[in-house]
Image (cartoon, grey):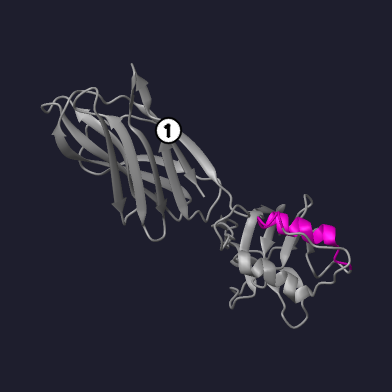
Amino acid sequence: MAYTVNFLDNELVTAEYLNQVAEDLGGGDLQFSDDMTYGVDDLNGIAQSLVTKGVSTGCVLSLTTGQVQIGEGVLFMEDGRKVVIDTEGVTLDLPENKEVYVWFEHDVLTGFVMPRCTEEQPSGADYVLLGRITAEGTVVGGPAKAWMKNPFPGVHGSETFVKRFYWDGVLEEKLLWEIDLADVGYQHVAVWSEGIESGEYIYNACCGFAELESGSAFSTMSTMANLADVERGFTYQSENSELLVSYSVLSSVSNHHYYVYLRFEIGDDGVLRVYQRAKRAQAGYNTSPAVNLHITLC
């Protein structure tokens, strides 16, 4: 099997190895010394305090006749043990015409960590689910995702998309974009635009952040509105992952400005859906240029 488990497979735990683990978890300023010894459980406890169990990167399932392969990647167990699967991957036998679950198990009695492919769904805390395979031979869903418990870079992955946005004049909420995601488990969406320069003015420069699970969101926007030399700033808070992204004009209705909002949802099918709505504000001039929106999932 082409995988290793930290603080289990390594008989000698060196300072070099520990410093690499610290860097992986975002604590690059931590320094371990060669003249010190470290308890295995204490070391795994460092990771446990910083990261949830789950897959950090990769570990994608693929099928061949009678077998399932776990691809290259990194995952963390409940107690903080780090499992690294190399480019060779891990191959398991696949029962015919059976619905099965693919997962890594930590046997707390022996201390061993091992890959499993079983008809029984795993339970308890000491496992990481990588996916389910239907009796028809289809991989369903993605792996359980590992996330940092502290707000610094570490195992988080991200995807960024740039979309050209111009309000089309529709007031009612409607589905605007469906964006296929390469990964799963994202918890936050960040949106920003540098706006667009028109003459000496900048229109609709915005920035917003939403927590997808709770829906808590905050956004702010700066633009030129009403009189050409008057800069206006707006802030907006929501509880449904909705962000303010534009202050636009619908010229066919007496040149009234409209607040334009985008709402973000991630479906179980791994698709980011973006919904648009608008609300009338006040009279103004027809200044509503298109902007590039940068959308980052993390």
Percent of width and height locating residue 191: 42, 41
Residue at image position (59%, 78%) is 124
- Which of the 4 image quarters holds residue 244? top left
Count numbered badges in the picture.
1
Question: Residue farthest to the left?
Answer: 254
Percent of width and height locating residue 268: 45, 56
Relative placement, left or right, of 94 versus 226 is: right
Magenta residue check for 294: no
Name the residue nearer the viewer: 220 or 248: 220
- Which of the 4 image quarters holds residue 6? bottom right
- Which element type, helix, strand or loop, lies under badge 1? strand
Above or below 23: residue 11: below
Q: Residues within 10 Å of mark 1 (few under 14, many from 20)?
A: few
Above or below 46: residue 56: above
Residue at image position (42%, 53%) is 267
Name the residue nearer the viewer: 40 or 277: 40
Give the residue number, with chain letter if any, for mark 1.
163
- Which of the 4 image quarters holds residue 2? bottom right
Name the residue nearer the viewer: 125 or 296: 296
The quadrant of the picture occupied by the N terminus is bottom right
Write down the region rendered in magenta.
Answer: 12-29
Above or below 164: residue 213: below
Tell me which amino acid carries mark 1.
Lys
Magenta residue check for 26: yes
Name the residue nearer the viewer: 206 or 74: 206
Judge whether residue 53 can be spotted in this image: no
Percent of width and height locating residue 271: 45, 47
Percent of width and height locating residue 83: 73, 62
